[in-house]
Image (cartoon, helix red, strand yellow):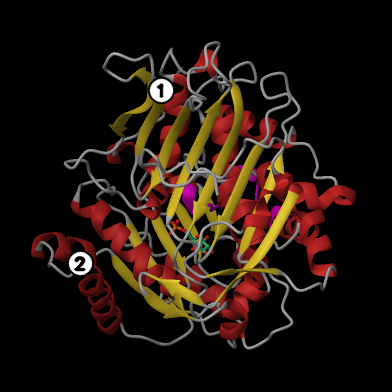
């Protein structure tokens, strides 16, 4: 296998053009992320950052605004010399929506090659409806044309709201861009803990032989949050847990867990293997939906000892059937996974915030005292770890076994903490899109969830409620294939109590 890791000196001189530069993502993630990359010497010396916003802002005021973003993020302060170097990379260009010549002016600004390197990466942190129009406007003035220099476009999540709109967006973009120019974000792919899944699976001889239906009973992919929807009620009520989390982050986690060994670690190698497994997931039978999918909404309850309102109260609409809890049972139709259920679930306002892959193995040949089955757990967040639960004799005169846990941290205290956006920004400049979604991945994911989204939206029966801060609703167990299956909780030993 070949490696694709690149150092800053492998990055071409380039200009990063940030649309929506004064928005929340840019303030909280992109500018602090770029500053950190600069501080650790990972940005090319001549990288420039051109912010594009609707308002007229002087360069001086814009640079002062960037300083306020960094002050807000790095409360303990930062290196003054690193700041001076970073701030000097930054420029601002006003693009008022009412100006018909706005993109011609942008082109004129960028054509100053004494300041701006001509390889251009556009980061579209704008409303999804504006993705294609912005690309169209860039193309009209020749700013997406690749000849001597590369041109790349980053599109934020969500890529469409269903299969049809994803296809429409794709056809809007590909009028002017090749697939290799489009970088679709799923920020989970920028997390080191997600990137670890593929490496941990395939760089360990002991894991691959047991990673199949001969040994595995079922797999659970879980992402739960203690937070509620907060001030995103309108967005959330038009989205729901299935589209917000499962269509993207959770199916990507599943793909990394279930994919075959890629032919190499190049972007095409990794993405081809993920596409293949995503396309092998059996469509969810809508006529038997109740056995394969479960939804619920959080009601008022207590989180960390504090009373919190229910979803419908926050929304101010008691008729909404939009789910804040979604669980699916999936099967993958290939020889490795034939007959192995994958239970995937996500929830807001559950009793714990945890993202993990939990794998339960089949019964061992010798059963002593109804022993537990082996579990292997890959913790993604908050703790990055790998754990294995095995049976061992209880020391003493009797023949008895108990579960012990082998626990290894995948992250050590001294390890660098890199935000997902930092990793993705670096990959963008390197031209490595392995951690960005290919269109076939986005489409496969929509194809899978669309029928469930539609069936749930059409069914106006009041949705099952769970008190905020509780564990999974009892009724969610309806999707389990076998009586002895249960939701695996905390990754700590003993966290696997059947509910
Ligand atoms: C976002 C979802 O994509 O991911 C949010 O829209 C969710 O609802 C978030 O809270 C979770 O991301 P992370 O990185 O905090 O696990």
Q: Say if 381 sits above or below 303 in the image.
A: above
Q: Is residue 256 on the magenta stretch? A: no
Residue contact between numbered discs 2 and 1, judged by CB atoms under 8 Å: no
Where in the figure is residue 326, as x and y percent of width and height?
A: 65, 57
Residue nearest the viewer, comparing 439 with 499: 499
Q: Which residues make up the magenta segment? A: 173-188
Which residue corresponds to the image point at 49% horizontal and 75% vertical from the top-left?
Answer: 301
Is residue 448 shown to the viewer in this render? Answer: no
Secondary structure found at label 2:
loop
Q: Which of 240 and 220 is in front in this view?
A: 220
Residue 101 position, x and y percent, is 58, 80
Could you say which quadrant of the image residue 388 lies in? top left
Please give the name of the residue rendered at 57% of the width and 48% of the height, measured from the top-left corner.
250
Q: How crowded is mark 1: few (under 14 residues within 10 Å), some or many (20 or more)?
A: some
How many angstroms separate mark 2 from mark 1 (CA)? 43 Å
Q: Give x and y (percent) for residue 338.
A: 73, 24
Q: Which residue is drawn at 57% across and 55% down?
A: 346
Closest to the observer, 110 or 478: 478
- SS at mark 1 in the image: strand
Q: In the displayed structure, would residue 240 be above or below residue 253?
A: below
Which of the marked residues, 2 or 1, is nearer the chain's N terminus?
2
Which residue position is annotated with label 2?
Answer: 74
**Quadrant of residue 36 within the rendered picture:** bottom left
Above or below, comparing residue 287 to residue 102 in the picture: above
From the viewer's perspective, tell me whether residue 407 is left or right of residue 274. Answer: left
Q: Which residue lies furthest to the right in this view?
A: 287
Q: Is mark 1 within 8 Å of ligand 1?
A: no
> Is residue 182 magenta-colored?
yes
Tell us which disc is closer to us: 2 or 1: 1
Label ID, residue 390: 1
């Amino acid at each position: 296998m070949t490696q694709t890791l690149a150092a800053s000196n492998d990055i071409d001189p380039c200009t990063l053009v940030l649309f929506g530069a004064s928005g929340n993502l840019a303030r909280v993630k992109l500018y602090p992320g770029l500053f950190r990359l600069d501080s650790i010497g990972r940005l090319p010396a001549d990288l420039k950052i051109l912010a594009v916003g609707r308002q007229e802002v002087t360069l001086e005021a814009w640079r002062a605004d960037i300083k306020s973003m960094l002050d807000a993020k790095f409360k303990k302060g930062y290196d003054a010399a690193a700041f001076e170097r970073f701030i000097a990379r930054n420029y601002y260009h006003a693009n008022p929506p009412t100006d018909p010549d706005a993109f011609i002016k942008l082109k004129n600004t960028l054509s100053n090659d004494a300041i701006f390197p001509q390889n251009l990466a556009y980061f579209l942190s704008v409303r999804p409806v504006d993705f294609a129009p912005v690309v169209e406007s860039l193309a009209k003035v020749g700013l997406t044309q690749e000849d001597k220099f590369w041109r790349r476009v980053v599109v934020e999540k969500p890529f469409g709201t269903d299969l049809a709109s994803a296809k429409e967006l794709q056809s809007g973009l590909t009028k002017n861009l090749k697939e290799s120019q489009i970088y679709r974000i799923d920020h989970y792919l920028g997390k080191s803990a997600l990137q670890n899944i593929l490496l941990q699976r395939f760089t360990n001889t002991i894991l691959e032989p047991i990673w199949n239906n001969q040994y595995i009973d079922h797999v659970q992919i879980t992402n739960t949050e203690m937070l509620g929807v907060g001030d995103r009620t309108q967005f959330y009520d038009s989205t729901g847990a299935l589209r917000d989390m499962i269509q993207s982050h959770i199916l990507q986690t599943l793909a990394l867990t279930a994919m075959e060994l890629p032919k190499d670690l190049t972007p095409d190698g990794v993405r081809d293997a993920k596409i293949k497994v995503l396309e092998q997931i059996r469509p969810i039978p809508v006529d038997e939906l109740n056995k394969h999918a479960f939804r619920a909404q959080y009601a008022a309850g207590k989180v960390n000892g504090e009373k919190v309102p229910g979803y419908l109260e926050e929304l101010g609409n008691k008729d909404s059937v939009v789910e804040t809890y979604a669980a699916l049972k999936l099967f993958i139709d290939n020889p490795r996974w034939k007959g192995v259920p994958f239970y995937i679930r996500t929830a807001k306002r559950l009793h714990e915030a945890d993202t993990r892959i939990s794998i339960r193995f089949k019964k061992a040949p010798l059963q002593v005292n109804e022993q537990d089955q082996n579990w292997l757990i890959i913790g993604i967040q908050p703790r990055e770890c790998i754990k294995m639960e095995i049976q061992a004799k209880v020391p003493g005169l009797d023949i008895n076994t108990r579960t012990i846990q082998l626990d290894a941290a995948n992250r050590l205290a001294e390890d660098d903490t890199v935000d997902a956006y930092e990793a993705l920004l670096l990959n963008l400049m390197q031209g490595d899109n392995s951690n960005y979604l290919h269109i076939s991945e986005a489409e496969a994911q929509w194809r899978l969830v669309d029928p469930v989204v539609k069936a749930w939206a059409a069914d106006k029966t009041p949705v099952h409620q769970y008190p905020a801060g509780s564990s999974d609703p009892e009724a969610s167990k309806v999707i389990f294939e076998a009586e002895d299956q249960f939701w695996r909780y905390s990754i700590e030993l003993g966290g696997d109590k059947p509910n």
